[in-house]
């Protein structure tokens, strides 16, 4: 577990954004819905963004196997 309680993951693209979550396609081709409450600086992401790095809580990363 990182000292910041966040896991940093490379992503290919933000596929979709809703009021509560964003759908991210990771560099391995998998996609996952990420609730804004579990994403650092979630207001920084818009549909079509990428590639880049996204920081999500360690809890969510472990729960999703990311």
Image: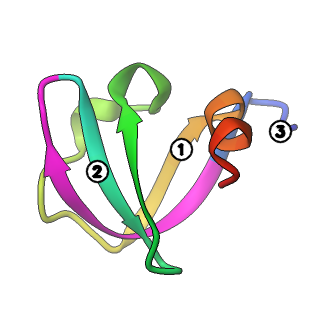
Quadrant housing residue 57? top right
Q: Residue at x 20, y 63 (%)?
A: 49
Where residue 64 appears, as percent x and y from the top left, is: 62, 45
Q: Is residue 36 above or below residue 10?
A: above
The circle on residue 23 is 2
- Say which element carries label 1: strand
Q: Disc 2 and disc 3: Cα gap in Å?
A: 24 Å
Q: Residue at x 74, y 28 (%)?
A: 5
Depth order, front residue of 61/39: 61
Q: Residues within 10 Å of mark 3 (few under 14, many from 20)?
A: few
> Colour mode?
rainbow
Query: Could you tell which of marks 3 and 1 lies nearer the N-terminus?
Result: 3
Quarter of the figure with the N terminus: top right
Q: Residues within 10 Å of mark 2 (few under 14, many from 20)?
A: some
Residue on which the image places disc 3: 2
Q: Residue at x 28, y 50 (%)?
A: 23
Q: Is residue 63 above or below residue 28?
A: above
Q: Is residue 36 above or below residue 44?
A: above
* Prevailing SS of the magenta stretch: strand
Q: Disc 2 and disc 1: Cα gap in Å?
A: 14 Å
Magenta-drawn stretch contains 17: yes
Say left or right for 51 vs 46.
right
The circle on residue 55 is 1
Quarter of the figure with the C terminus: bottom right
Magenta-drawn stretch contains 11: yes
Query: Could you tell which of marks 2 and 1 lies nearer the N-terminus?
Result: 2
Q: Which residues are magenta?
A: 8-19
Where residue 3 appears, as percent x and y from the top left, is: 84, 31
Say left or right for 22 vs 6.
left
């Amino acid at each position: 577990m990182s000292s910041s309680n966040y896991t940093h993951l490379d992503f290919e693209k933000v596929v979709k954004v809703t009021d509560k979550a964003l759908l991210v396609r990771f560099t391995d081709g998998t996609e996952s819905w990420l609730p804004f409450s579990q994403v650092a600086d979630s207001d920084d992401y818009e549909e079509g963004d990428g590639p880049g790095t996204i920081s999500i809580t360690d809890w969510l990363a472990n729960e999703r196997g990311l």
